[in-house]
Amino acid sequence: MKAVVLERHGGPEVLALKTVADPAPPPGWVGVQVRACALNHLDLWARRGMPGVKFPLPLILGNDIAGVVREVGAGVDWVKPGDEVVMAPGFGCGHCEACLGGDDNLCRRYAILGSALNGGYAERVVAPAANCLPKPARLTWPEAASLPLVFLTAWHMLVHRARLRPGEDVLVLAAGSGVGIAAIQIAKLFGARVIAAASTQSKLEQARALGADEVVNYAECDFAAEVRRLTDKKGVEVVVEHTGKDTWGKSILAAARGGRVVTCGATSGYDAATDLRHVFSRQIQLLGSYMGRKASLHEIFRWVERGRLKPVVDRVLPLERAREAHAALERREAFGKVVLEPEG
């Protein structure tokens, strides 16, 4: 089969289209014909390499996969060849206390497709059968592939970590990103008032179209000061933070007394400075969040089927243009997901 293979860390030029062995699913796994694979920032980090993190090279990237089941391993009877599926990107060991309690993303052996093992930049992929969810009928293949990682991440941030309540004010940073787009919609679903922040007017207009009540261009103003103006100096109850170093300090300043700053990433750098005076004097809660409970995808997909949550696709490129897809994501050109499609 054809696949885009990462053999060494570096820029987009290290991604190489190659012919590799067609994988066969072991017991409990399935073989899936990939119809679409959406990019995430995790793809960029894996390609570049990360201090203290070892990726199993050579590696096929791609966390978000939608496709058709072609074969099933021994012991699999809940999906069958021909089923159209979307793959949950993460999985735990299945037998530790965290996994058995439903918190598989807290498993010490938690792994993500396209990071710890081969993913969806390929014509076919093998994955745990337990990660198969029925593809929402109303979605195209690129839309379906754009769902799992970012909506699961945003859901876990807002619902399980921040415990969002109706009527609260929520600041969503990087509103044009996959997590940002999902967070805007989820916050509105739960009855919050959303302030969306992005770096271009075009992204802010699209954020409004998704339901954002107010928008802030953080390339042109002090977004913490603008948030306080929009909230009558109160600040927001919840900050959805995943930009990191460039915005971290002001994210804390934008939070209300007793507010929650929940973070799932650090695209601009992880070594952010924290002024602890603001944390303890205003009793700010700093919450870390990583992926989400696999079971939450079932609830998310129900809202997708009802048309209340929707993925946003910026562009679809053929598999052989993976380098171009990475470059577009790095340049922050996209509003929504960049998706790769194998031929056929």
Image: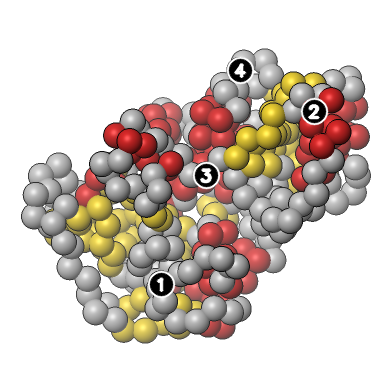
Does the residue at mark 2 contact the one at mark 4 (Cβ under 8 Å)?
no
| 79 relative position to 58: left or right | left
- The quadrant of the rendering that contains the C terminus is bottom left
The local secondary structure at tag 1 comes to: loop
Give the Cα separation between the discs numbered 1 and 3.
21 Å
- Left or right of 20: which side holds 260? right
Q: Label 3 to label 4, Cα distance in Å?
A: 21 Å
Q: Amino acid at mark 3?
A: Tyr
Q: Which mark is residue 165?
A: 4
Along the line of sight, which residue is nearer the eye, 21 or 33? 21
Q: Which marked residue is nearer to the observer: mark 3 or mark 2?
A: 2
The mark nearer the N terminus, 1 or 4, is 1
x 69%, y 29%: residue:
285
Question: Callout 4: helix, strand or loop?
Answer: loop
Q: Measuring 21% from the left and 61% from the top, which residue is drawn there?
A: 31
Query: Which mark is first along the chain, 2 or 3?
Result: 2
Q: Quick check: marks 3 and 4 in contact, CB under 8 Å?
A: no
Q: Residues within 10 Å of mark 4 (few under 14, many from 20)?
A: some
Whether label 1 touches label 2, CB < 8 Å? no
- Quarter containing the N terminus: bottom left
Q: Amino acid at mark 1?
A: Pro
Q: Amino acid at mark 4?
A: Arg
**Residue 21 to residue 105: above or below:** below
Specify which label sits upstream in the sequence, 2 or 4.
Answer: 4
Residue hosting label 3:
290
Residue occupied by mark 2: 280
> Which of the two discs, 1 and 2, labels the residue nearer the N terminus?
1
Query: Callout 2, which amino acid?
Result: Phe
* Badge 1 or badge 3: first in the primary sequence: 1
Q: In the image, which is nearer the foreground, mark 1 or mark 2?
A: 2
